[in-house]
Image (spheres, rainbow, N blue to C red):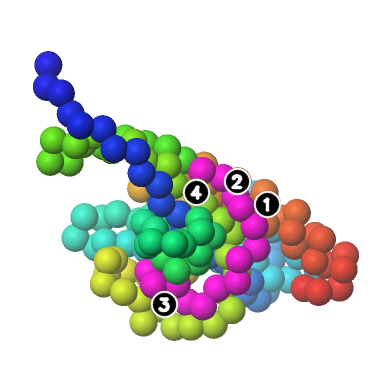
Amino acid sequence: MERYRTIRAYSAGGVVFRLVPITFTELYEPTSYLVERADNSEVEVALVGRSQAGIWALPKGTPQAGETVEQVAAREVQEETGLQVRLITYVGSISYSFVREQIRYHKQVRHFLFEAIGGDMALHDHEYDLVEWFPLSEACRRLTYQNEIHILYQAEDVLRRWLQYQQKEGQK
C-alpha cells in the first residue's frame, strides 16, 4: 500500500446571487426553486466553468497570508466572477479529499452568501473560462459536484429567510 503525506487545507468561496425581474410567462411556469417575492423577481446564481472539462462550480479559492475566511471568500468570488459583492452570511462547509503528486489533501471549503452589487463578468480572472448567471433550478442541474449542489440548496434556504426579513424591514 502506497503511503501519502497528508495535508489539511481550507479554502473559501460562495454563492453569488442577484434578483432579476420575472417576465409575464415565467410567472405562470411552475418551479419549486422560485423564491417567492412580492416584487415579482427571481434569484439567479453566478457559476464558474471550464468549457474544456465541462465543469461548472461555485467560485472558491485559497487564503493569502493574514486573510480571514470571509476575506478569502469575498476576494476569490470577486476574482473568479468579475463581480463586486456584498457578504450576507455564512452558508455552510463541505469537506473532501484528493491526491496530487504523492500528497493526500483533506480540504474544507467554507461557503458564504454574497449579493452581486456591481462589476462585470467579462473581467473575471483566467482560472475559469466561463462565468454565467443561471436561475437556481438551472444552477442545481449545471453544478458538477454533488456537495456544491447541497451548498446551493442551503444557500437557497438562507436566502429565502434573508429576503423575507429584508421585505419585512422594507429594504428589498
Between 131 and 29, the residue placed more toward the observer is 131
Is residue 147 among the parts visible in the rendering? no
Q: Secondary structure at mark 2?
A: helix
Residue span colored magenta: 77-93
- Residue drawn at point x = 34 percent, y = 38 percent: 8
Spatial CA distance of label 4 from label 3 is 20 Å
- Residue 158 marker: 1
Question: Is residue 26 shown left or right of residue 142?
Answer: right
Mark 4 residue type:
Arg
Mark 1 residue type:
Val
Circle 3/circle 1 CB separation < 8 Å: no
Q: Secondary structure at mark 3?
A: loop
- Residue 82 marker: 3
- Residue 154 marker: 2
- Residue drawn at point x = 37 percent, y = 62 percent: 64
Provide residue 156's location: percent of width, then percent of height.
63, 52
N-terminal label among 4 and 1: 4
Q: Residues within 10 Å of mark 4 (few under 14, many from 20)?
A: many
Spatial CA distance of label 2 from label 4 is 12 Å
Q: Is residue 43 magenta?
A: no
N-terminal label among 3 and 1: 3
Circle 2/circle 1 CB separation < 8 Å: yes
Q: Is residue 85 magenta?
A: yes
